[in-house]
Every structure is written in C-alpha cells, then in structure tokens.
Amino acid sequence: MNEPNRIEPNRKQSANVYTVMLLLSMLFMFVAVIAMFVEFRRYEGTLPWKTDDARPQVMHAIDAPHYL
C-alpha cells in the first residue's frame, strides 16, 4: 500500500514564463538606465535643467490698461 502521509523533500520550482519575463524586464530596465546615463554624460557635466545663465533677449512691457 501507498503511504499517504509520506513527506517529500521540498522541490525547487522550475522557472515558468512569468519568471523569464521578469528577468527580461529587469535586464531591459538595466540597459535603459545605462543608456540614460550615457545620454546624460553627453552634456559634459552641465545640468540641462539649470537655467541660471539664461537671460531673455527682449522684454516687452504691456502698457494697455485692460491687461493690468
């Protein structure tokens, strides 16, 4: 007779399609981070969002009373 209470050792589950998709997404995210770092280094150390040096060329004053 079979013993129904027999305990099997824990087996490791095989990788399914969702595990492979997760690993591929992690790989692609890592590649994207590296690509963005390379693009950031193309600015040679300047930060593109710092606009302290930007000065307007022309400034118009609106004198019409309906705009005030």
Image (cartoon, rainbow, N blue to C red):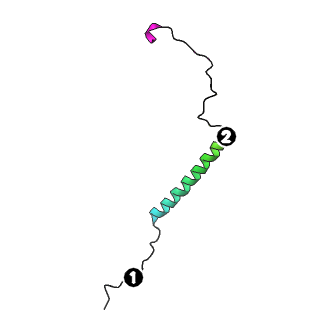
Of the two numbered discs 1 and 2 on the same chain, state the one appearing first in sequence: 1
Q: Position of residue 38 (x, y in %)?
A: 64, 46
The answer to whether 7 is drawn above or below residue 66 in the figure is: below
**Could you tell me which secondary element the residue under label 2 belongs to?**
loop
Residue that appears at 43% across and 9% down? 66
Whether residue 58 is in magenta: the answer is: yes
- Disc 1, disc 2: CB below 8 Å? no
Judge left or right: residue 42 versus residue 26: right
67 vs 3: above or below? above
Residue at the spot x=42%, y=81% of the render? 9
Residue 21: image x %, image y %? 48, 60
Q: Number of labelled discs?
A: 2
**Considering the image in quadrants, where does the N terminus appear?**
bottom left
Q: Amino acid at mark 1?
A: Glu
Which residue range is magenta in the image? 54-68
Q: Find residue 46 and report its horizontal and vertical position in percent.
A: 65, 37
- Front residue of 20 and 36: 36
Name the foreground residue: 20 vs 40: 40
What residue appears at the point 52 percent right and 59 percent down from the top-left corner?
A: 24
How many neighbours does mark 1 have within 10 angstroms: few (below 14), some (14-19), or many (20 or more)? Answer: few
The picture quadrant where one finds residue 40 is top right
Q: Amino acid at mark 2?
A: Gly
Q: Which residue is mark 1?
A: 8
Q: Which mark is residue 24?
A: none
Whether residue 36 sits left or right of residue 23 in the image: it is: right
Residue 4: image x %, image y %? Answer: 31, 85
Residue in view at x 60 percent, y 33 percent? 50
Q: Which mark is residue 45?
A: 2
- Nearest the viewer among 66 and 51 is 51
